[in-house]
Image (cartoon, rainbow, N blue to C red):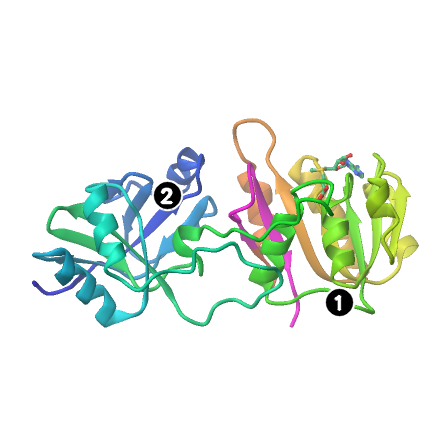
Amino acid sequence: MSDVQHLDAACYHASPGFMDHLAGELPAPYRTDGELLTVMGPELQAYWTRNVWQKPFVAEFGSIKEAASLLRSIQRNWAPYVHRHARRTALIAEALPPLPSKPKAFPFNLPDNPMGAFTLLDEHSLMASARCSSPWPNGELSFLEDKEGPPSRAYRKLWEALVMAGSMPGPGQRCVDAGASPGGWTWALAGLGAEVVAIDRAPLDESVARLPGVTAIKHNAFTLKPAELGPVDWLCSDVICYPPALFDWVSGWLEAGLARNFICTIKMQGADWDRATVAKFAAIPGSRVLHLWHNRHELTWMLVRP
Ligand SMILES: C[S@@+](CC[C@H](N)C(=O)[O-])C[C@H]1O[C@@H](n2cnc3c(N)ncnc32)[C@H](O)[C@@H]1O
């Protein structure tokens, strides 16, 4: 086994379907391995990623066993990014401790153990990183789903955002869910025991409107003033709108000082994405913007206070 060679670089693994968005965010890569772009220098802000390999290294190896023991000597968890030599990559993964593969029951805490990632560059060399931005293997997360309760599957992105935030609404807390129809997010918030004011121009599914603690308001969410709604612990939005309209609405709430935590989906319109508005969201102190595993052509902005 040759020595491990650390790279002064980061490897950006594109969110599925958004390789072009990611490539447009980054300078020219030093190398491209499928949907993994290795860019020299310190880690850069890139939103359209499923995972970022933060401390990449390359190493040569003779056998599958040798590759697995090198990785195992560093830490327990390694997710294979299968690109070149798929069979060999899978055999190395099989020689490593198994990764949790079952859908997870919400809620749960972020795992304590780091999740690494590796891929083969050729038959006898691998690239890997023990430190990655996502706690999930290759950024992939699946929940044990409720196929009957929620009227849409959109609740999964709210669940993912709450797990990432490490904080949840609960009994005695008040949430506003803007763009609530048909009611997946409201169902998830009510399921945590919180009170929910669900606002949409379209009706809420009746089964959700009847849940304890849910109040449905049929209205344009953007024309209701914060003072009319009063203080909220969690201000959530999944409204389909142009990003600047969402930003103006959020700014009004921030100025009013009536919302403690925010989770909002920034939905992109058309084929491109609104970098300028995303930059404005990202500049809000204490907040972050992520492409969650359950996001589509959208990013999640969250401001969750300790
Ligand atoms: C993606 S859907 C929301 C799905 C919902 N989060 C769920 O979990 O079922 C977007 C919603 O935004 C609503 N919407 C669009 N503009 C709105 C506005 N100005 N005020 C309130 N709702 C709006 C639409 O009626 C639509 O129901």
Q: Is residue 244 left or right of residue 80?
A: right
Measure the alpha-carbon separation of dots 1 and 2.
Answer: 39 Å
Q: Is residue 73 visible?
A: yes
Q: Which mark is residue 218?
A: none
Q: Amino acid at mark 1?
A: Gly
Q: Nearer the viewer, mark 1 or mark 2?
A: 1
Q: Amino acid at mark 2?
A: Leu
Which one is nearer the viewer's eye here, 122 or 237? 122
Q: Which residue is labeled 2 in the image?
A: 26
Which one is nearer the viewer's eye here, 144 or 108? 144
Residue located at (16% from left, 60% from top):
67
Q: Is residue 281 left or right of residue 14?
A: right
Which one is nearer the viewer's eye here, 211 or 159? 211
Q: Is residue 254 visible?
A: no
In the displayed orientation, state which residue is furthest to the top. Answer: 270
Q: Which residue is labeled 1 in the image?
A: 170
| Residue 251, percent from left and from top | 73, 52
Q: Quadrant of the C terminus?
A: bottom right
| Residue 84, percent from left and from top | 21, 41
